[in-house]
Amino acid sequence: MKKFWKIFGWICLGILIEFKFDVIAGTVYLENYAFHDRTYYVQMNMTPASGDLQILKVHTIVHHSLGPDYFATVYIPNFYKVINKKPYMGAEAIPGYTAYNMNMKRKYRDVLSTEDFIIQPNAVGGEIPATPVLIDFLNLKQSLHKDNTYQLVTSKNRMQLEGPEIAGATYPQKLGM
């Protein structure tokens, strides 16, 4: 029986050292890593404001994330002017698009953000073909997911948002993501 407790003690000590003396955090980390895929959700809707202005509401979620540092960048086509936000210059430049930063906050195991963009078309009375609104999810090291599901269309001075109610993509959990 003494040998059993000696071996059991060494195993417990190894577990404590492995997880930096925090068993609960280590258990949660392993549970996240082993059992959950990471899912990226994007939800957009557009509501009319006064005149040719529209409010584009963008909601982003990283579900079951391991790390704390997630960022989302919204790329709005240059055919449209954003009235209430300043462009984000720290993002990768994509020709024909202006980047805007999402304010991502952690809530339990999710990282989420909601932003409202007041937009109007640059060309008055013009036709603007279907152009995707790009969302780039990234962390401090790499780009994790790019979404181009939603499209903005303007015809006869009427802006429309085309796309599903909610778009999502699921990836298996990996270390370093």
Image: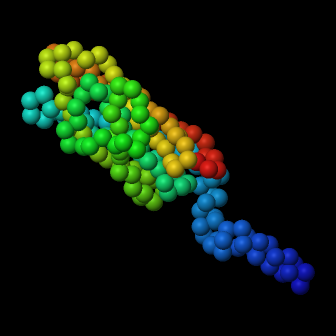
Front-lying residue, 103 or 26: 103
Residue depicted at x 61% and y 42%: 172
Q: At x 63% / y 53%, what residue is drawn?
A: 33
The residue at the point 82 percent across, 76 percent down is: 10
Q: How is the image coloured?
A: rainbow
Q: Is residue 57 left or right of residue 103?
A: left
Counting from the top left corner in percent of width and height, residue 9 is at 80, 79
Name of the residue lying farthest toward the left? 51
Q: Is residue 140 left or right of residue 4?
A: left
Q: Is residue 135 above or below residue 10?
A: above
Above or below: residue 12 compared with residue 61: below
125 vs 84: above or below: above
Q: Residue 149, image x and y in percent?
A: 40, 28
Image x and y of residue 35, in percent: 62, 51
Report the front residue among 58 and 90: 90
The quarter in which the N terminus is drawn is bottom right
Q: Is residue 64 visible?
A: no
Which residue shows up at 55% across the image and 43% down it?
Answer: 142
